[in-house]
Image (tube, coloured by chain):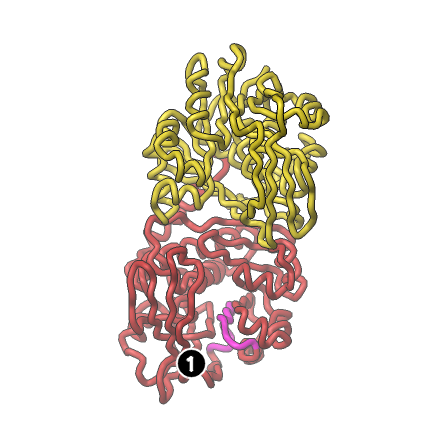
Chain colours: A red, B yellow
Amino acid sequence: MADLLVVGSVALDSVQTPFGKVREVLGGAATYFSFAASFFTGVRLVGTVGEDFPPEHLQLLREHRVDLGGLQQRPGRTFRWTGEYGYDLNEAKTLDTQLNVFADFKPALSDTFRSTPFLFLANIDPELQLDVLQQMKSRPVLVALDTMNFWIQGKRSALLQVLGKVDVVTINDAEARQLAGEPNLVKAARAITGMGPTTVVVKRGEYGALMLSEGTFFVVPAYPLETVYDPTGAGDTFAGGFMGYLAAQGRFDRGVLRRALVYGSVMASFTVEDFSLERLKRLTRQEIAERYDAFQDLIRLEG
Amino acid sequence: MADLLVVGSVALDSVQTPFGKVREVLGGAATYFSFAASFFTGVRLVGTVGEDFPPEHLQLLREHRVDLGGLQQRPGRTFRWTGEYGYDLNEAKTLDTQLNVFADFKPALSDTFRSTPFLFLANIDPELQLDVLQQMKSRPVLVALDTMNFWIQGKRSALLQVLGKVDVVTINDAEARQLAGEPNLVKAARAITGMGPTTVVVKRGEYGALMLSEGTFFVVPAYPLETVYDPTGAGDTFAGGFMGYLAAQGRFDRGVLRRALVYGSVMASFTVEDFSLERLKRLTRQEIAERYDAFQDLIRLEG
């Protein structure tokens, strides 16, 4: 059974970090998200790729319980992103973006897809996010969205409209400040809950994440790692672990939301240990359970 | 009874942040440290001030269980520091430093002071830190030190010598990387334990702190605040809460060390809510207990 639908980018990434360089490897928000979430639940992916998209990538996702029934393969080239990171690995410098077939991506959900109970609107044009939400047969049990500075600046009104209709927003700290127009992160998160979502998840890169839900904060660090090769996809993997766990539980009370945030952090911690989805491809459920335990120990005050 | 001895600076600070400006207010590492620690235990302060040091500051510390028997008042002017912070409040820009009587500070411990069981060597010349340690009658139960980039670069060999003799080091993240010559913070912290201390506490400003002790990491966020006026003294207050709690417990097993880190974070969270020691002056034990409880809730995974 597929409980979780994601709409977003599937891409070929070229990335350089101080620790290495890869060219046209599997990437994209929906890719990282769905692969991470698939460790917890069945996932349906809606996106688009070009004729040049390597079939082995499709195979990889299919083998991992990702339903590609919503992935349109269209004439033209796949979305390509080229970026590099400096030693602090905190912020990507985008060197080149070629939208290609993604430029006129128009999600069309099949009848089956329209009744998926958990929905994640990855970082795409808020007008498309709104359109997807309207295609759903009934209001999903839980809807989350991710966004970025580009839409906050350029499509603010559409973004505010879709924000008013979702339960959870995942957003970077700088973008949370930008969206709220408020330099203090606590006030910014509160302001964002005023825009609609009951839960705001602020991603802080190497410093972890902060969640404001029903007026209460929960803060988790990033898992301390000795080897970080490439942060690309960390935020999307984080969201995939978070939403995948929630969808598997089928509920989202306080305890479940907090554990979901830790599963998100756990999944992100694996992603950054190698380029592209390489670490996730080798990842086992046993390793996830072990790192979750280690994470608990990392933040446990008593005992 | 005074359980905790601190050696360090007492200063008059002039600070500008986006939220206000103060001139020649009470500051200095030993001041912030001792005031914070005095909520938990009796504190002995060793330092120096000039003839111009306002007597009301001495009175304030005395009323707060800080034994000033080791504070030399000498001919000349008190140490003055002038700095400013931008909107991110992360890093102070030093505009002016006048060492004055602090330039030839030579700590001389009285017979009573020499047998204090807990010792904190605040951020001063590592040669002085070593000298203080040698003045102690017997090895204290616990010795911690703080240091900074200036000494890491300029007095590395003396610093390594004193590091080999202490139990705990508190240090900023950038300085931990610099001291270890290692960009990865996990590897850097491990490398520093190899220099002597069994416990390394890395201060990360608005992102909290990380502790490596007996091979195990514990990570706490900073308490999320809606109003941050001035981060000056946050690190020293943090150390004061941490050491004050340890000294009051008289032991430092895993659970006590973790709670101490949270008390350090709690104390730092109050300091930054106002300039100088203003917030600490109004602070009650009840407020500390309440924020500790709130902090527990902030990081608790289960429940």
Which residue reaches farthest top?
B111
Q: Nearer the viewer, residue B257 or B156?
A: B156
Give the chain letter at badge 1. A
Q: Position of residue A3 (x, y in %)?
A: 46, 68
Up-down relation of residue B255 to residue A269 (above or below): above
Queried whether the magenta region covers residue A116, the answer comes back as: yes
Q: Position of residue A215 (x, y in %)?
A: 65, 53
Q: Nearer the viewer, residue B256 or B73?
A: B73
Residue depicted at x 50% and y 37%: A301
Q: Position of residue A156 (x, y in %)?
A: 62, 74
Quarter location, residue B159: top left
**Quarter of the rendering occupied by the N terminus of chain A:** bottom left
Q: In screen coordinates, is A143 left or right of B197? A: right
Q: Position of residue B106 (x, y in %)?
A: 50, 22
* Residue indicated by mark 1: A99
Residue depicted at x 33% and y 65%: A16
Element on which disc 1 rests: loop
Quarter location, residue B235: top right
- Magenta residues (range): A113-126
